Structures are given as structure tokens and as C-alpha cells.
Amino acid sequence: MMEQIQESIQRRAAEIEGIIKSYLPAEAGPQRTVLEAMNYSVLAGGKRLRPMLMQETYRMFGGRGREVEPLMAAIEMIHTYSLVHDDLPAMDNDEYRRGRKTTHVVYGEAMGILAGDGLLNLAWETAMRSFSVSGQDAGFVQSAEDPTRDEAVRMRRVAGAVEVLARKAGVYGMIGGQTADIEAEGEGQVSGEQLLFIHEHKTAALIQAAMMAGAILAGADKEQVLQMERCAYDIGIAFQIQDDILDVTGTVEELGKPIGSDKKNQKQTYVTIMGMEASVREVERLSGEAVKILASMEGDSGFLRELTAFLIHRKK
């Protein structure tokens, strides 16, 4: 069973990799160095979890077109830029990411900052391309009675998806979580409530953006979108706690980065605050709740449920 889901993930990840590559810039012109650094960062590997969740949620709610693809590439660019900046000396000062030297180590600190800036700006340029996908390529069946109205509905869906992505990536989402994380480090002591705020915003917010945007694009109603927001919260918190667990129990070979980096940086995590056993139980509880929400949806949620279960047992 585990091998089958791994094969399904790898097959989808390969498809997503091709989509992402199609939106990356050509490495040419006077700005070639920053373009190389951007591509180096994005193509360093990774699970492609966020675009995968977006695509599968879109499909679960009946989406069949290509309008989701620019947003899939955009969310991975946003995720990658956040990692590039996270690895900088001013932040976590990490030398390895996904088994390779981090961007600032290879290209220098200044170029690392610019590469992150470039990816964030390219992400919005890419996301906007969802508007220009034709109705046919979007899988949107126009009625003969009023095709103009149908196109307006599709435009509103795209706008709603882009708006969710922008908010969850910004100061009320991921950046807000990063801010709280930095300030908590300065305080030296973090409460469980503070840590949950950090995890919800720094990690879960982009997962929420992925699943909510996929649902909105496919035409899900407001209640269904809110259900996906809750489901993604559970997945995101469970994913981050599992990350904290792996920082203690994993190996360099498995993770592709040094283990114990949280301890080295004197960073408090769910494991250090709640303990290992409680952390493992919470991952199981949150994942179970997410699977229950997915099972209640009318569409085919089989792969999303398998993916959620796989994430809590991952070793990297």
C-alpha cells in the first residue's frame, strides 16, 4: 500500500515538475545571474506538496481544465522564495536545503535576497496568467444561452483563488507567521499558543491557500471552501509537527539537511514543549480529522486521503 501511494505521488510530482518548469524564466540577459539563482532554487527538488494539493482539490470538486496550472506554479514559487529567505544568515543560516547547498551559499547573500524577491514577483505574474486561459482549456463548459455570463463566473473564480493565495502568503498568513517566529526566538520562551500561531501561519497558511484556491477554481461553494480551509489547517499543523519530530529522529541522508538544526538554533518546537509522545498523538489526531473531512466530500477524495495518511508517516 505504501509503495503504491509513493508511486502515485511520484507520478503526480513528475507531472507538476513539468508544469512548474514551463513557467520558469530563460537564463539570459544582463539579469542572468538572478534568473539562474531563481531556477536553481525552484529546481532543487522537493515534494511539490502545495501544487499537488491544489490540483487534487481542484479535481475533487470537478475541475478538469488547465486554469489551475499557473496557480500551481505560482504557489511553488512563493513557497520556494520563502525557503530561500528562510535559509539566509539573518534568518536560520542554513547551508543545505533538499540535499544541495542553499541559494545564498552558491550565489552569495545579496543574490539570495534578490532571487527570493524575483520568485515572489514572478509568482504573481504567473498567477495572473490563469485569467488568460481560454474557457475551453479551463474545462469550463459554456452554455449556448449566455456564454458571456459563464465567462464572468470563471473570471470571478480565478480572482477569488488569486485573492486567497495573496492573503495566505502575506502578513496575515505566511509572513505573519515568520514574523512571530523571529520575535519568539528573541524572547527565548515560547508558549504552546504562540507556537500554534506560528505553525498555523508560517506552514499551514500556504497549504490552506492551495486547497482553498483549488476548490474555488472548480466552483465549490462557500461552506465547502471553509471545510477545505479547516482540512488544510489540520494537514499543515500535522505536517509541521512531523517536521519537528523528524528534526529529532531523522538522519541527514533521509532529510537532505542537517538534523538537530532546531536545537542548534535554540528553537522551541512542538516536541520540546509538548514532548515526543504527545506530538506523535497530535499528528495522528489532526490527520484523522483531515481525512474525515475529505471523506465527507462528494467528489473523489481517495488520493487526497492517501496523501494525508502518507505525510504523517514520512521520513523526510
Image (cartoon, helix red, strand yellow):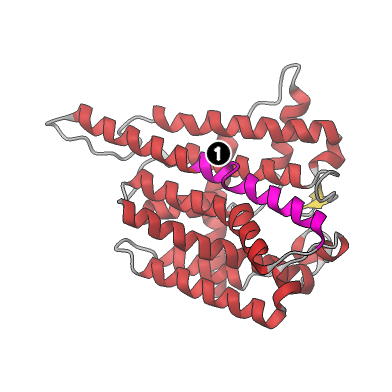
Left or right: residue 132 compared with residue 71 = left
Spot the residue most to the bottom. Answer: 277
**Residue 257 image point, x, y percent:** 80, 58
Q: Residue at x 11, y 31 (%)?
A: 145
Crowding at dot 1, Cα within 10 Å, few <14 / some 14-19 / many 20+, comes out as many
Residue type of the residue flagged with mark 1: Ala
Instruction: Assign a secondary structure to mark 1.
Output: helix
**Residue 173 image point, x, y percent:** 57, 48
Q: Residue at x 52, y 65 (%)?
A: 234
Q: Is residue 15 above or below residue 112?
A: below
| Residue 173 among those drawn in magenta | yes
The C terminus is located in which quarter?
bottom right
Left or right: residue 267 compared with residue 309 = right
Left or right: residue 119 compared with residue 51 = right
Left or right: residue 145 compared with residue 11 = left
Q: Magenta region: which residues?
A: 165-188
Dominant secondary structure, magenta: helix
Query: Disc 1 marks which residue?
Result: 74
Q: Residue at x 28, y 39 (%)?
A: 140
Q: How many marks?
A: 1
Camera-side residue of 27 and 288: 288
Q: Residue at x 40, y 68 (%)?
A: 293
**Residue 247 image point, x, y percent:** 77, 67
Q: In which quarter of the view is residue 122 placed?
A: top right
Spot the residue most to the top. Answer: 30
**Residue 188 image point, x, y percent:** 82, 61
Q: In which quarter of the view is residue 250 placed?
A: bottom right
